[in-house]
Amino acid sequence: MRKVSIFGATGSIGVSTVDLLARQGGAAAFEVVALTGGRNVALLAEQARTLRAQIAVTAHEDCLNDLRIALAGSGVEAAAGQSALIEAADRPADWVMSAIVGAAGLAPGFRALRHGGTLALANKESLVAAGPLLLSEAARHGATILPVDSEHSAIFQALVGEDIATVERVILTASGGPFRDWPAERLARATLAEAVAHPNWAMGQRISIDSASMFNKALELIETREYFGIAPERIEVLVHPQSVVHALVGFADGALMAHLGVADMRHAIGYALNWPARRETPVARLDLAALGQLSFMAPDPVRFPALRLAREVMETRGGAGAAFNAAKEIALDHFIAGRLGFAAMAGAVEETLARLNARGDLTIAPSSLDQVLEIDHLARVTAGEVIAGAGATMTGKAGGKRV
């Protein structure tokens, strides 16, 4: 019986993963080691009871008592806090879903690789902030990393049986989010409610906002370079409003291999769960005749400056990926709190990277996870200073203007 753990079980990816496990036999087919979540302890406890997990962990220590009460009589152990997350990752598992959002997912993912199993990677920040280290750690322990982002799963599937040396280009698609048709000047007034209203995907708040700003796609550009080793100039982005084509891979003979599917993350999760086999997955089947057409367009660099910043990060390398992600997370925190305009997030990230570069803080590639986390902390502090220092003068313009 395969041992599995889910880090980030109460988020959208985690919920879909639990659904697939339940559909494939649940506790009778899998030995569920650990489930972790945030403040939604009622859902976490329900999942743990259903799958008969060994342990359920909430990231928030003040939620521990509620979790214990919710699990009373179930036989499931309850724990809380960062040390408990690490302890859960230290428990051997054959297959681990890494779906904690943000830099918080780095340490558990790294620890899980030590078991030499499979890490299903939905935490894109792991590759953005520490790609070379993560891949090296996997190789050292004989572990496998499978991408769960829909785009990278699509690329992975298109490359099955192919020689990556023949890849000429990779095209990532982006829905364009709720603001794809907005004039750039209107973005300065975009509200939180408007930013989370994704037209195609049902996702959590933070990733929905990242999609609206294209920071999500910016992270995926960097992910593609790190995971597949594709040169940045060979990675393209197209806005594809229907979200049916998840990625395309172009080969030296001019052929393009496209991966198509409905906007349902259970496809990519199911592929990672059952790899190298395929298994029936409860996703809707495409009706191309009903769909009628697929459209593509180049992303507007003024409306979406995050893509330009990602390319600058790929050129800088070193600690730039970790700093980029950290600054983006701080800018996002301030937007959610109403202290920063939607379009000003890119300006705050750009200024943070400029200050760190000027001090030489990003030139040396981190050689350990601790060094990655040091850069992450430094970038968060600097981003906070940038935003606080700008105050009322913070621009909301979408062109990435310095603050």
Image (cartoon, rainbow, N blue to C red):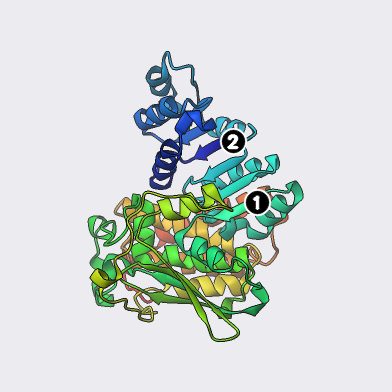
Callout in the foreground (2, 1): 2
Q: How busy is the neighbourhood of tag 1: few (under 14 within 10 Å), some, or many (20 plus)?
A: some
Q: Which mark is residue 96?
A: none
Mark 2 to mark 1 CA distance (whole Å): 15 Å
Residue at image point 53% right, 51% down = 272
Residue at image point 23% right, 66% down = 189
Residue at which label 2 appears? 2
Quarter of the image for the C terminus: give it.
bottom left
Q: Residue furthest right?
A: 140
Mark 1 belongs to which amino acid? Thr
Mark 2 belongs to which amino acid? Arg
Residue 403 visible (yes or no): no
> Mark 2: which secondary structure?
strand
Q: Residue 67 at x, y = what percent? A: 41, 23
Q: Residue 313 at x, y = what percent? A: 56, 70
N-terminal label among 2 and 1: 2
Q: Residue furthest bottom?
A: 254
Instruction: Relative to 166, say whether 73 is above or below.
Output: above
Name the foreground residue: 150 vs 101: 150
> Mark 1: which secondary structure?
strand
Q: Are marks 2 and 1 in contact (CB under 8 Å)?
A: no
Instruction: Relative to 216, say whether 111 is above or below.
Output: above
Instruction: Relative to 250, say whether 291 is above or below.
Output: above
Residue at which label 1 appears? 144
Q: Is residue 319 left or right of residue 255?
A: right
